[in-house]
Image (cartoon, rainbow, N blue to C red):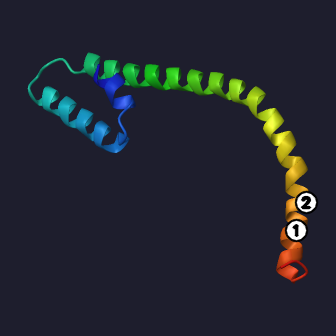
Amino acid sequence: MLGILGAVAPCQISTNMGAISYTTNRMAQGKKWLTEIVSFFAGKTFVYFLLGLLVLWMGKELEALTIPVFQATRKIIGPLFLITGLYFVGCVN
C-alpha cells in the first residue's frame, strides 16, 4: 500500500526518504523487511505502469482529435507571421 501511495505523491524524494526511514527502523528492530521493500517497489512499479498505459491511451486519442486543429493552425500561422513581420518593419501600424 505504501508503494501505491508513494507513487502518486507529489514529492518522490520525501516519499522515498520516508520509506527508507521506515525500512531502516524495521531492520533495527529485527523484523521482516525484505517483503516490505519488494512490496513498496512493486506498488510503485504497478502505479507507474498504469500511468504509462493511461498516457499512451490518451495520447492516441488526443492525436486523432488534434489533427484538424493543426491543419487549421498551419493555415493561419503563415499570414500571421507575415503581418507580424510587416508590423515590426513599420509597414503596418
**On the rendered structure, is 25 left or right of 83?**
left
**On the rendered structure, is 48 left or right of 2?**
right
For this rendering, which residue is in front, 50 or 17?
50
- Across and down, in percent, residue 46 comes to 45, 19
x 86%, y 64%: residue? 81
**Compared to 62, does 31 lie above or below?**
above
For this rendering, which residue is in front, 71 or 9?
71
**On the rendered structure, is 6 left or right of 74?**
left
Disc 2 residue type? Pro
Disc 1 residue type? Ile
- Across and down, in percent, residue 77 comes to 85, 55
x 85%, y 61%: residue? 80
x 90%, y 57%: residue? 78
- Residue beneath label 1, please? 83
Quarter of image, res 45: top left
- Residue beneath label 2, please? 79
Using a 10 Å C-alpha cutoff, classify the residue at mark 1 as few (fewer than 14 neighbours), some (14 to 19) or many (20 or more).
Answer: some
The quadrant of the picture occupied by the C terminus is: bottom right
For this rendering, which residue is in front, 35 or 69?
69
Using a 10 Å C-alpha cutoff, classify the residue at mark 2 as few (fewer than 14 neighbours), some (14 to 19) or many (20 or more).
Answer: few
Secondary structure under badge 2? helix
Mark 2 near mark 1, Cβ–Cβ under 8 Å? yes
Q: CA distance from mark 2 to mark 1?
A: 6 Å
- Across and down, in percent, residue 87 comes to 84, 76
